[in-house]
Amino acid sequence: METETQQLPALPDSHGKFGDYGGRYVPETLMPALDDLIEAYEELRDDPTFRAEFNHLLATYVGRPTPLTYARRLSEHLGGAQIYLKREDLAHTGAHKINNALGQALLAKRMGKRRIIAETGAGQHGVATATACALLDLQCVVYMGTVDMARQQPNVYRMQLLGAEVRGVESGSRTLKDAVNEAIRDWVANVQDTYYIIGSALGPHPYPMICRDFQSIIGTEARAQMLAQVGRLPDEVIACVGGGSNAIGIFNAFLQDQVKLIGVEAGGLGIETGKHAARFANSDFGFSNSTSALQGQSQTHSQSKIQNPKSKIGVFQGMKTYVLQNDDGQIAETHSVSAGLDYAGVGPEHVYLRDLGRVEYTNATDEATLNAFHTLCRLEGIIPALESSHAVAEVIRRAPELSRDAILLVNLSGRGDKDLNTVLNAGNVR
Ligand SMILES: *Cc1c(COP(=O)(O)O)cnc(C)c1O
């Protein structure tokens, strides 16, 4: 299928909607805070001193621009398309998350808020936020499910070393969605002096927009680097999708180009097992994507022994979006080998881009992901995050089928040091 050049409207609209998705579904007490945030952001995003301060920190503290690396051995090994890696793994704290955390911490400071709260799952966003708060002299409280705290001990220590207070959350499944709920509760109670930094392109308007804008530096740089280093744009851009921030960050610069955009979700143990976090692979709606249609065939009725969660449009954590739910309408327990993709909801702009057919969504299983992880280690000397390894898995699937002059650009969203225990426990898949 040829990708048509499309003139997409600038979104979200004045209601914070991307088509039918997004919006603001929060307690009444938070509406004024969201109004203040919209006002402050709209003023500051075009403010030359704010932009200069952000750009200066990106260059001198985060280490931007991150390089664009030609993956020569991986390309030769696969025998098809030429593969380029956008190296967000080389950003300070080891992933793209610092771009958003730092941007929002600067925003909070400009708004006169000295107390920052954040939620974290694996701890990556918590570490990025604690880092930004140390740098900018802001008080920092991070909510984290106690199950996640046990699984991600090193990141708990990191946050504490950086001066943050980590508050364990004992409710629900004691993981990310429960941490978000607790952070929202804190925000309602302390909205006067507190700024809530959400870690992905999620939540009520204006958060998905703000996060996209701060992360769009990834695509802006990568597009210019492709033109400078290769002399043309890539044919396809591939990124993993948890909440969707690294993906929208790299896609945003290519939306108006004739470039195919591919988001990769967590396929977990396989869609048919019900243990995954692939919001776009398993819904009640018609899908044009053939991969999804195929996977849909294995879906069974509610009498099935396997509880296979399905995506439904719902209101979840402040926004209208696709949410994986069980037959009884409860938010589904999701599964992924990578904590960063293990989430029932997805950023509303992705749902919009999917409906439009502008971005194609697929998924990679845990097994394909671990394989991709090892392949990149051995062939390129790069230990990728398991989240990013999902995007690499899709490249390994696609590249051999493409000609040698095709170009694939992959967003390597983070480094894999944090995942060594998981990989060792999974055993040697080779
Ligand atoms: C958190 C994380 C992700 C997933 O979050 P997005 O908002 O979808 O980008 C992906 N990669 C890494 C390395 C992460 O830390």
Image (cartoon, rainbow, N blue to C red):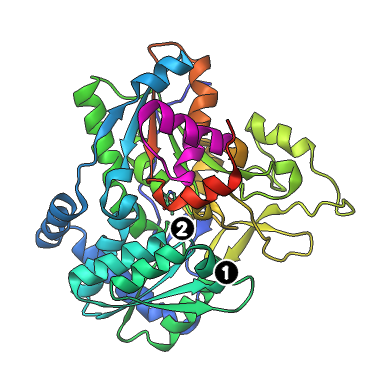
Quarter of the image with the C terminus in it: top right
Q: State the image coordinates of residue 274 (x, y, percent, origin top left).
A: 73, 49
Query: Is residue 359 toward the left or the right of residue 427 in the image?
Result: left
The answer to whether the residue labelled 2 contacts the one labelled 1, judged by CB atoms less than 8 Å apart, is no
Kind of residue at badge 2: Lys
Name which residue lies at 47% across and 68% down: 24
Residue 220: % across, % down: 26, 40
Label 1 secondary element: helix
Task: Tell me which secondary structure the magenta stretch mostly adopts.
Answer: helix
Residue pictured at 42% horizontal, 81% vertical: 187
Tell me which numbered mark, 2 or 1, is placed earlier along the sequence: 2
Q: Is residue 234 left or right of residue 285?
A: left
Q: Residue at x 24, y 77 (%)?
A: 138
Q: Is mark 2 within 8 Å of ligand 1?
A: no
* Picture layout, residue 128 above or below residue 87: below
Decide which of 24, 248 is in the foreground and name it.
248
Task: Give the amino acid type for the residue marked by disc 1 in the picture.
Answer: Val
Q: Is residue 301 above or below residue 412?
A: below
Residue 255 can be seen, yes or no? no
Q: Dot 1 surroundings within 10 Å: few (below 14), some, or many (20 or more)?
A: some
Alpha carbon separation for disc pair 2 and 1: 34 Å
**Residue 12 placement (x, y as % from top left):** 40, 55
Taking the magenta stretch, the answer to whether it contains residue 377 is: yes
- Give the residue pinned by disc 1: 147
Graded by Cα atoms within 10 Å as few (under 14), some (14 to 19) or many (20 or more), the crowding at tag 2 reads many
Q: Quadrant of residue 66?
A: top left
Magenta region includes residue 32:
no
Residue on which the image places disc 2: 17
Front-most of residues 84 and 352 = 84
Which residue is depicted at the point 27% across and 65% down? 131
- What mark, if any, has residue 246 been given in the picture? none
For the magenta stretch, what is the residue range? 368-392
